[in-house]
Amino acid sequence: FGMMQGAGGEKHNMDPADPWPEALKLKHEKETLGFYITGHPLRRYAAEVKTYGNATTGTLSEKPSGFDVSIGGLVSALRTMRTKKGDLMAVILLEDWEGIVECLVFPDTFAKVQKLLETDSPIFVRGKLDNDESSSKILAMDVYPMERVKEMLSRTVTIRIDTSSAPQDIAEKLQPIIDEKRGSAEVVFELEYPGRFIVLVRPNPYVKISPDREFVESIERICGHDTVRLT
């Protein structure tokens, strides 16, 4: 500890270092130890994994071969190769907080999603499960960036409106936002009459939207915090 003193025995007080951001801390844990200690990067997407997934690496062995699996994870490792026809494909190791599973990404799919398959990238995979007595594999058919899973996979968007506090022109305010974000998700309005009842209203079935982050933020600026639910 003498190194912390000046020539005349003077002590130097050092300001405490700022803590590392969570993502950086976990990255260094993985690089140094080969595994995570204080958490898992996928935890920030726990809601997406639970809502849109139907399996985790820990439950795959319970599913039959041919099962249509939807699962979220991190790209732990990536290896590319050529098929006999010379087409490029990939084998990735997909990691969640329960383990790792091998995913085969065949040429047609790989050509579309290659940019998403970077080490440590959070992704969502849909495909067919190939189970045998010793291991599980996923034959990937679709791969999505985790940050866009809600937007791309939501089938229903429920907008809650408190009728006691909603502005009189709320319909006029919501209409242009809905018109601008057309997509494939159904819209349901949940009209709340506080202390009385709730009414679910489905507009014209042709009214479908793409609920990206901008859409959710725009709606909640009008209807209030946490009034949009994606399923």
Image (cartoon, grey):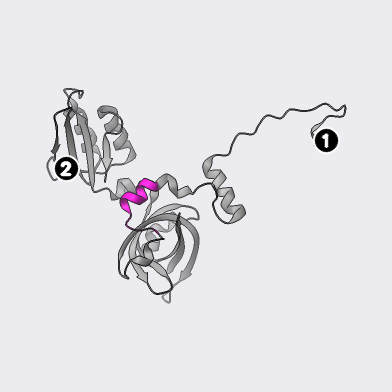
Q: Find the distance from the CA under tag 2 to the CA under tag 1.
A: 73 Å
**Location of mark 2 (residue):** 207
Checking the image for residue 2, the label placed there is: 1
Q: Secondary structure at mark 1?
A: helix
Q: Main secondary structure of the magenta part?
A: helix
Instruction: Determine which quarter of the picture holds residue 138.
Output: bottom left
Task: Mark 2 and mark 1 in contact? Answer it, CB < 8 Å.
Answer: no
The reply to whether the magenta stretch includes residue 53 is yes
Q: Residue at x 29, y 50 (%)?
A: 153
Q: Residue at x 65, y 31 (%)?
A: 16
Position of residue 132 measured from the top left corner of the image (x, y, whole percent): 38, 74
- What span is colored magenta in the figure? 46-56
Q: Amino acid at mark 1?
A: Gly
Query: Looking at the image, which residue sits at the far left?
Result: 204
Please state if 205 lies on the left or on the right of 45 as rendered: left
Q: Does residue 106 appear anywhere in the picture? A: no
Query: Looking at the image, which residue sits at the far front?
Result: 195
Of residues 35 and 175, the one nearer the viewer is: 35
